[in-house]
Image (tube, grey):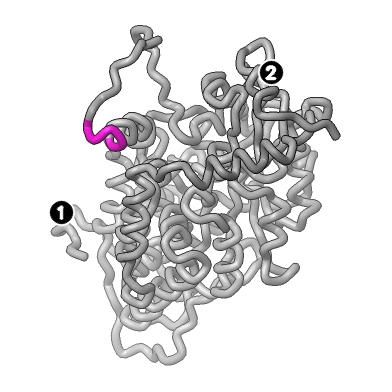
Amino acid sequence: MSTFTLAQVAEHNNTSSCWVIIRNKVYDVTDFIFNHPGGPQVIMDYAGKDATTAFVPIHPSDTLNKYLPRGKHLGTLDEDSIRELRAASENKGKSRDELRVEEAVKDKPPLGRMINVQDIEETAKKILPYKAMAYYASAADDSISYSENARAFSRFFFRPRVMKAVSGVDPSTIMLGFKSSVPIYISGSALARLGHPLGEANLTRGAYKSGILQMVSSNSSMSYTQIAGARGSSEQPLFFQLYKHKSDDIAGRRIREVEELGYKAIFLTVDALVPSNRELDTRAPHYLEEYENQGKIAHGESTYKSGDVSILGTAGGLIVNNDLDMTWEKTIPWIRSVTKLPIVVKGIQCVADAVLAVEAGCEGIVLSNHGGRQLDYSLPPMEVLYKIRCERPDVFAKTEVYIDGGVRRGTDVLKALCLGARMVGLGRAFLYAQSAYGEAGVVHLVRILEREIKFAMASLGVRTVDQLVPELVERVDWQPLSPKL
């Protein structure tokens, strides 16, 4: 294998010849510049340089082997250059944000002081690098759907039954034939390694230890193989969240890969076809620039053109190759032709589409507006669930119905189950938990919700989840006070 010096690599710093260094290896990415999902500038910022710190946290380890031809894997740096890079890294001063994170980690409260979901979120936001926090916390436009996702649960009140035998409350349930200790699952969320070096592995191991189920995102920051390898047992089920690529060939390879790895279901994401306007995430680089310059804005030569505003943010580029022409008539049968795994459609936002999913033979649906991160003013999933219960209750007998978005309490979970949901997914909450406390944080979050769920079940007068029925909840028209945590 050829070896190169830093000076040799630095000569290839333009669109005609562009080399980058990643983990001390040299790659020719010239042909990929204008095909990069995040745009050419992402690559050109590191043309002729070491791109390791930018590349590693948001790309699975097998990305270059999968998508860059072998002939573009040029070789490695020579030993002197590797030592020079290492010394430069050791001598590089820390940014203000890195120093802020270090101090926040020192002051991080013990895990045992986290008594609810909100505690974990607030702690994580303090210790996360700003870029990661902005990506995890961002929502679409004015964050209306994001806020209303949670508020929607406050419009449903319980009608508890008393004088019921409730000893031995059992919150376990079944999802697609697999048992879960509690009726919650880890919803697919991208880029867990932005918050913790072990990223998705924390989620997988925590799911195993707490007996719950995990959906793995197409845009995970670890490879599907690595995540499967993190399972506590080869019998631990994993589900796969598919962002279908516009190329059927690429999408088909991805499905077959996860099926061979033992993933148990395909969750087809249909509510995030194009990059959305997540302004907190988009502004993150500008905020960090001003923060590092202590409030001063750098005034250099600008290449800005009127109307030329990028909203891709940290991960918008991950979905620019999504299939924009999926249909019920074409896409579901195509997936059936590729795999025998159950198909769940993730991102149902109205009653009509829930019915179409049933008619298409889908084994499940997820009522979701992508956590309020896509189309602002899309209805809260809890309201969609209520509409299905009122207008088409037959849907619940024909397919499994799940819901995600805005869940903060065990009581939220039970309200959804009373209306017919089989399981409730949480995405951000688990990202925050693993970011702040690793695998232990994931387990602790499950235990918090399990405690709240078991208490609420006993208080409602039920022992098992199948006793949670619509008669136990009532939708109110008056506006409750905001909860105080």
Of labels 1 and 2, the one closer to you? 2
Instruction: Look at the picture and state if 4 lies above or below 342.
Output: above
Left or right, 198 with respect to 148, comes to: right
Q: Position of residue 197 (x, y in %)?
A: 54, 55
Quadrant (top left, top right, bottom left, bottom right) of the C terminus: bottom left
Disc 1 residue type (three-letter):
Gln
Residue 244 locus on image (x, y percent): 64, 35
Residue at left offset 60%, top offset 39%: 85
Disc 2 target residue = 30
Dot 1 corresponds to which residue?
A: 479
> SS class of the residue under badge 2?
helix
User: Label 2: few (<14), some or many (≥20) within 10 Å?
Assistant: many
Label 1 CA crowd tier, 10 Å (few <14, some 14–19, many 20+): few
Confirm or deny contact between disc 1 and disc 2 (CB under 8 A). Answer: no
What is the span of residues highlighted in magenta in the rendered image?
291-295
Looking at the picture, does residue 240 appear above or below residue 176? above
Identify the amino acid type marked 2.
Answer: Thr
Residue furthest front in the image: 80
The picture quadrant where one finds residue 303 is top left
Q: Nearer the viewer, residue 459 or 230?
A: 230
